[in-house]
Amino acid sequence: MVGYWQRLCWQQTQTKGDKSRRIWFNERMRAELAAYVAAHKPKHKTQRLFYTQRSEGFTANTLTHIINSFYQKAGIANASSHSGRRSGLTTLADKGVSVRVLMALAGHSQIATTQRYIDLRPSVVRAAVELVC
């Protein structure tokens, strides 16, 4: 099922650096969003998909607080709303995804920026050494 929710973009005013961003969804997320959209039937493409109890839609600040509360409930210390982004990029890099693809997913314009997000894990270094004859 193809729907406008498969091509969501952040507006320039909603992002760091005032740049539009494409948001990528895997198959499972697309299915979940399709079910949600079918149940909530937006009237037009610019209508917000998710609402809070007190406002028309989630703000960046609201989402930051929600994500931080998830980390606290999980007992993860010193995590921020940005930690998942860094962890996700590192996990994909560990699985062999190229830095160019990671750059596109992150919405970065410079590979150097993306490289700063990727944590170097000793296990990955050891595995690379083992590849050498």
Image (cartoon, rainbow, N blue to C red):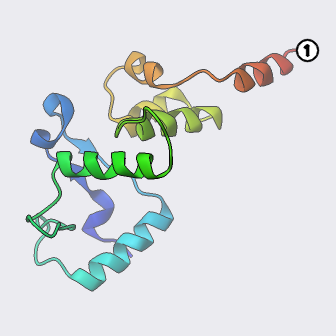
Q: Quadrant of the C terminus?
A: top right
Residue 35 lies, in percent from the top left, at 36, 79
* Relative depth, front residue between 97 and 121: 121
Residue 17 lies, in percent from the top left, at 17, 28
Residue 40 figure quarter: bottom left
Work out whether 78 lies above or below 75: above
* Relative depth, front residue between 45 and 130: 130
Q: In which quarter of the image is the N terminus?
A: bottom left
Taking 131 as reference, is 35 left or right? left
Residue 106 lies, in percent from the top left, at 37, 36
Q: Tag 1's secondary structure?
A: loop
* Relative depth, front residue between 80 and 115: 80
The amino acid beneath tag 1 is Cys
Taking 79 as reference, is 36 left or right? left
Residue 58 lies, in percent from the top left, at 17, 57
- Label 1 neighbourhood size at 10 Å, few (<14), some (14-19), many (20+)? few
Which residue is at 70% across, 21% downward?
122
**Which residue occupies the extreme right position in the image?**
133
Q: Residue tagged by mark 1?
A: 133
Work out whether 131 lies above or below 24: above
**Which residue occupies the extreme bottom position in the image?**
39
Which residue is at 65% across, 38% downward?
95
Residue 111 figure quarter: top left
Residue 18 figure quarter: top left
Q: How many marks?
A: 1
Work out whether 62 lies above or below 14: below
Work out whether 99 lies above or below 58: above
Which residue is at 41% across, 57% downward?
25
Taking 106 as reference, is 28 left or right? right
Which residue is at 64% across, 33% downward?
94
